[in-house]
Image: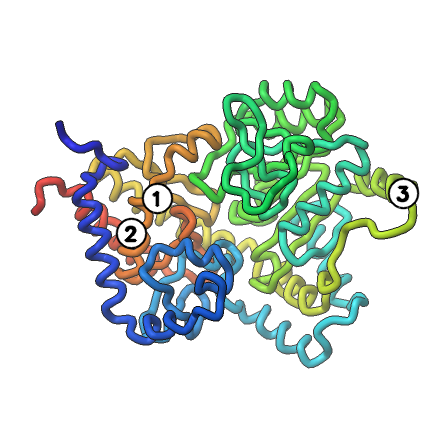
Amino acid sequence: MGKDLIAGIDPDRLTAFAAREAKRFAAGRVKSRAAAKGAGVFLDNVPLHWMKDWPMPFLPLVQDAKDARIVDIDGFELDDFCLGDTGSMFGHSPEPVAKALRAQARRGLTFMLPTEDALAAGHLLTHRFGDFRWQIATTATDANRFSIRVARAVTGRPKILVFHGCYHGTVDDVMVELVDGVTRNRVGLLGQVADLSLGAVACEFNDLAGVEAALAKGDVAAILTEPVMTNSCMVLPQEGFHAGLRALATKYGAVLIIDETHTISTGLGGYTRVHDLSPDMFVVGKCVAGGLPTAVWGMTPQMADRYAIANAQRPSGHSGMGTTLSANPLQFSCLRATLGEVMTRKNYAHMESLAERLSVGLTAAINKVGAPWHVVRVGARVEFICASGPLNNGTEAAQAHQPQVESALHTALLNRGSLIAPFHNMMLICPKTKTRQVDRLIAAFDEVLTDLFNRDAK
């Protein structure tokens, strides 16, 4: 009996390929290898635990990053398609942002008072994303957390409806999953003692019947959703899904919160503007200030009125929202520069054009070797998925994930000069990405797949 294939690949061939690529990576990176030995001052040898998710034998240290290129301390130059997992979606240190950052650094870093940049940035947020009443946070996790508090306050209900496999940062309230029709804490949560199902309910993405059944119980304050499921194997909404969510939220009195932190890649104004969605609350983070840690959350004027009533009725004391360093002048200077000079229709047109070129090229390479894989694109964001598609929900996305294949492939692409996201098979195009960089990635992907699927080769 022959061995079971892994995403269409012979497992022995995959193992040998992975070992060869790991050795190739380590061979030339003498300085990074030596530096890694001194990283023991950090917990688990990394400054932030998810850096362990990179598949390389050890991490290269970045010396310089500009536009869509990274140079490590060993002198290797990489075409960057990870772009900080969206944090640098508009490229590394866009000139208008770098200029604004330098100017504000001379005028002060934080003082808990607004600036002229703050007022200008507020108007630009409305121009770009819609008529919302804005607040500033440092991360999208915080922005989602505060939005949840507002939704619970205005509705008087405890639960947040999320979709199985979703990603909204590290918000404890929504770290649940759906198993055999039952909402429970996600497996693997560290140090979590609370029963999160008391404050959240999970449904499958694209399942409006399941959403209505959950809402009909009358205890759901808000639906919190990404327009497209990301941070796993990407799942697109089926036709009518978002219109259905809006209708059901209205029917059952729930707040609809759209988290655009990853789907801002869709186009100018994010998925919400491009597809004319109508959320009650809107969240976006990561790249919104050009790479400086910043997130924004806003509510419609109607929601703002409801919030004002709830806020006026609460006892005096801590609201549990806001952090001291949020809404600092550095954020506003970079936010203003990004929204006004970087997040432009021209730049998005360039990004989407090259993303389409990348999508077509990757698909051609997959078809060439007959791999049972597919490619998904959302604006400037492209993913190859090591399974047949399309995927419909989080359960299917989890089943499509192939860590052994992806790990080997990511290292192999890096060895050929292209860096993609470590957590999944995500690639981003920024305004400074060049056609030749995209073509190099396509050629590398084609070379790797030809090797992996050449079952007759020795």
Q: Which residue is disc 3 drawn over?
A: 314
Marks 1/3: CA–CA distance:
48 Å
Q: Is residue 432 above or below residue 348?
A: below
Mark 1 or mark 3: whose residue is earlier in sequence? 3
The quadrant holding residue 295 is: bottom right
**3D distance between C-alphas at marks 1 and 2:** 21 Å
Q: Secondary structure at mark 3?
A: loop
The residue sitting at 60% across, 36% down in the picture is: 225
Which mark is first along the chain, 2 or 3? 3
| Disc 2 target residue | 442
Label 1 crowd (10 A; few <14 / some 14-19 / many >=20): few
Q: Position of residue 274 (x, y in %)?
A: 58, 41
Q: Which residue is mark 1?
A: 403
Asked if residue 179 is positioned above or below residue 29 in the image, the reply reads: above
The kind of residue on which mark 2 rests is Ile
Residue 431 coordinates in the image, percent (x, y):
47, 60
Q: Is residue 131 left or right of residue 379?
A: right
Q: Position of residue 402 (x, y in %)?
A: 34, 40
Front residue of this view, candidates 411 and 256 = 411
Tell us which disc is closer to us: 1 or 2: 1
Quadrant position of residue 326: bottom right
Residues at badges 3 and 2 in contact (C-beta under 8 Å)?
A: no
Furthest residue in direction bottom, as rendered: 106
- Tell me if residue 301 comes above or below residue 334 in the rendering: above
In-front residue for pair 136/48 = 48
Amino acid type assigned to the residue bearing label 1 in the image: Pro
Residue lying at 18% horizontally and 39% vertically, measured from the top left = 10
Q: Residue at x 22, y 63 (%)?
A: 24
Q: Given the image, on which type of amino acid does mark 3 rest?
A: Arg
Give the secondary structure at mark 1.
Answer: helix
